[in-house]
Amino acid sequence: MKGLKIDSIFPWEYGIILIIIGLILIFLGNRQSKKNNIDLEKLPHTRPTTKIIFGGFLIIFGCIQLF
C-alpha cells in the first residue's frame, strides 16, 4: 500500500477472516460485559475488555491487509 507505506504480508482473504474474527470478539466481549457474574466459580478466563481490545486490533490489521 503506497499511501500508508505499509506492505501487506498476507493475502486479502486472511484480511476478511481477521475482520470477521475481530467482530465476533467485540460482540462476545460486549455481551459478556453486560452480564453480572458474581459467582466465583463461573468467572470467565478473559475479561470482556481484553476481548474488545483484541477484536479492535484484529479489525485494524484485517483492514490493512485488505487495502
Image (tube, helix red, strand yellow):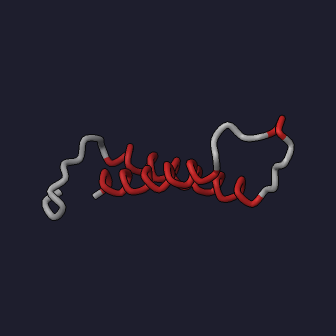
Tally the marks.
0
x and y percentages locating residue 65 in the rendered image: 31, 51
Q: Position of residue 25 (x, y in %)?
A: 58, 50
Q: Is residue 34 left or right of residue 29?
A: right
Query: Which residue is outermost to the right?
Result: 39
Res. 60 image quadrant: bottom left
Q: Is residue 45 above or below residue 35?
A: above
Q: Quadrant of the N terminus?
A: bottom left
- Is residue 36 shown left or right of residue 44? right
Q: x, y percentage for residue 47?
A: 64, 47
Q: In this rendering, is residue 65 above or below 46? A: below
The answer to whether 5 appears left or right of 16 in the picture is: left
Q: Nearer the viewer, residue 55 or 23?
A: 55
Residue at image location 63% in from the left, 41% down from the top: 46
**At 46% from the left edge and 53% from the top edge, which residue is drawn?**
19
At horizontal 30% and vertical 43% (from top left) the residue drawn is: 11
Q: Quadrant of the C terminus?
A: bottom left
Q: Nearer the viewer, residue 38 or 46?
A: 38
Q: Residue furthest bottom?
A: 3
**Residue at (29% x, 41% y) in the render:** 10
Closer to us: 20 or 26: 26
- Viewer-proximal residue among 47 and 63: 47
